[in-house]
């Protein structure tokens, strides 16, 4: 396939410095060469730039709805949506490296324009399914799934086309272990497919990915959104909202192999690598290794 690497160095969706350095930290792990070795053609499109630069900084402000850095997130989302839309339009596979998880508002908006029934597999310790009404923090990186489902701030919902970008039945959350009370209620109310860490320990991750693919069988394409905090902090120390009791690298590699073999992925985000919180560059190195499995690496 033809892969477009799109760096999305946004930090506006949260309040810890460093996550905007994620795209370069991952790309510097010979990412392009690694994917070329797997037989793909790879275009590194560099980093997307919003009007407000990359640093949220201490000037972050809450608006009336309690959202932090709304205008910056909105601006970045629009620019990124144009980039992913264009990549899909060309028949390429956009691979977006973050940056914080608010970037998925834009990346998925651009991709979803091309499909009637885009499925999303969201691998994350968190649900990211808050809205301004339920968010405990005001950080928009805790809200992208909510926004994509059509909840919360209208301007965010209407990025790159009016209204919701995905349907409740086309979403599967995997690896959840730190859901806010409003998120738990929302997931139950809308009957959203959600595999917690307990489910994963009882059933095995790759089996649950098979189940997710079955659940999404009527989708015309699938987008993967991979938050590195889905992995245990022992594996991924360099990320801003760590939660103990997470995935191990080997089981996620196996699950990504299952996803790759399905042939149904059309796009993916890899988010929340923060080099300033890392041990050396360990998290970015492992993120680059995981990326190889998204694109078909085998161990034999
Ligand atoms: N993409 C992430 N790391 N999200 C963390 C969200 C944490 C918390 N649920 C919040 O809404 O503030
Ligand atoms: Mn997330
Ligand atoms: Mn997370």
Image: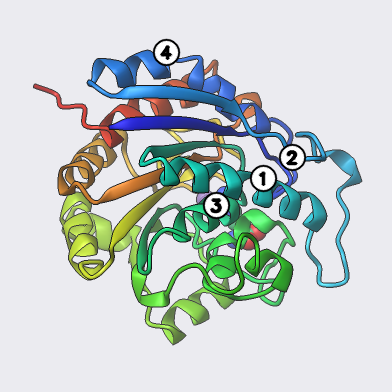
Left or right: 264 in relation to 46: left
| For residue 36, above or below residue 118 | above
Q: Are marks 1 and 3 in contact (CB under 8 Å)?
A: no
The first of marks 2 and 3 along the sequence is 2
Query: Residue farthest to the left?
Result: 300
Q: Dot 3 lies on which element?
A: helix
Question: What residue sits right under mark 3 in the picture?
Answer: 104
Q: Residue at x 47, y 21 (%)?
A: 282
Q: Nearer the viewer, mark 1 or mark 3?
A: 1
The first of marks 1 and 3 along the sequence is 1
Q: Residue 173: in sight, yes or no?
A: no
Assess mark 3: CB under 8 A from ligand 2? yes
Q: Position of residue 142 (x, y in %)?
A: 61, 59
Question: What residue sits right under mark 2 in the picture?
Answer: 50
Q: Dot 4 lies on which element?
A: loop
- Could you give the CA–CA distance between mark 2 and mark 4, rounded to whole angstroms? 25 Å
Question: What residue sits right under mark 4 in the picture?
Answer: 30
Query: Residue farthest to the bottom?
Result: 189
Assess mark 1: CB under 8 A from ligand 1? no
Q: Residue 208: in sight, yes or no?
A: yes
The first of marks 1 and 4 along the sequence is 4
Q: Nearer the viewer, mark 2 or mark 4?
A: 2
Question: What residue sits right under mark 1 in the picture?
Answer: 79
Q: Nearer the viewer, residue 76 or 228?
A: 76
| For residue 167, above or below residue 220 | below
Q: Quadrant of ligand 1?
A: bottom right
For residue 93, what is the image quadrant? top left
């Amino acid at each position: 396939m033809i892969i477009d690497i799109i760096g999305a160095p946004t930090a506006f969706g949260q309040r810890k410095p460093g996550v905007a350095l994620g795209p370069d930290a991952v790309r510097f792990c010979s990412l392009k060469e690694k994917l070329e070795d797997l037989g793909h053609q790879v275009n590194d499109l560099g980093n997307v730039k919003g009007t407000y630069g990359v640093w949220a900084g201490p000037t972050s402000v809450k608006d009336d709805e309690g959202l932090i850095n709304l205008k910056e997130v909105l601006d970045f989302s629009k620019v990124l949506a144009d980039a992913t839309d264009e990549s899909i339009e060309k028949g390429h596979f956009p691979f977006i490296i973050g940056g914080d998880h608010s970037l998925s508002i834009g990346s998925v908006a651009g991709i979803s324009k091309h499909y009637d029934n885009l499925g999303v597999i969201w691998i994350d310790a968190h649900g990211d399914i808050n809205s301004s009404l339920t968010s405990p923090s005001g950080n928009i990186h805790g809200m992208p799934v909510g926004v994509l489902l059509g909840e919360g701030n209208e301007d965010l919902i209407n990025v790159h086309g009016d209204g919701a970008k995905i349907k409740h039945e086309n979403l599967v959350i995997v690896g959840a272990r730190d859901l806010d009370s409003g998120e738990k209620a929302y997931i139950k109310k809308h009957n959203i497919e959600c595999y917690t860490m307990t489910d994963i320990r009882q059933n095995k991750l790759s089996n649950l990915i098979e189940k997710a693919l079955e659940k999404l069988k009527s989708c015309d394409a699938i987008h993967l959104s991979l938050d590195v905090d889905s992995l245990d902090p022992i594996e991924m120390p360099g990320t801003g909202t760590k939660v103990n009791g997470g995935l191990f690298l080997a089981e996620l590699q196996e699950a990504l192999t299952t996803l790759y073999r399905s042939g149904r992925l059309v796009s993916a985000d890899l988010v929340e690598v923060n080099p300033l919180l890392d041990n050396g560059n360990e998290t970015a190195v492992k993120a680059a290794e995981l990326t190889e499995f998204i694109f078909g690496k085998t161990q034999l």
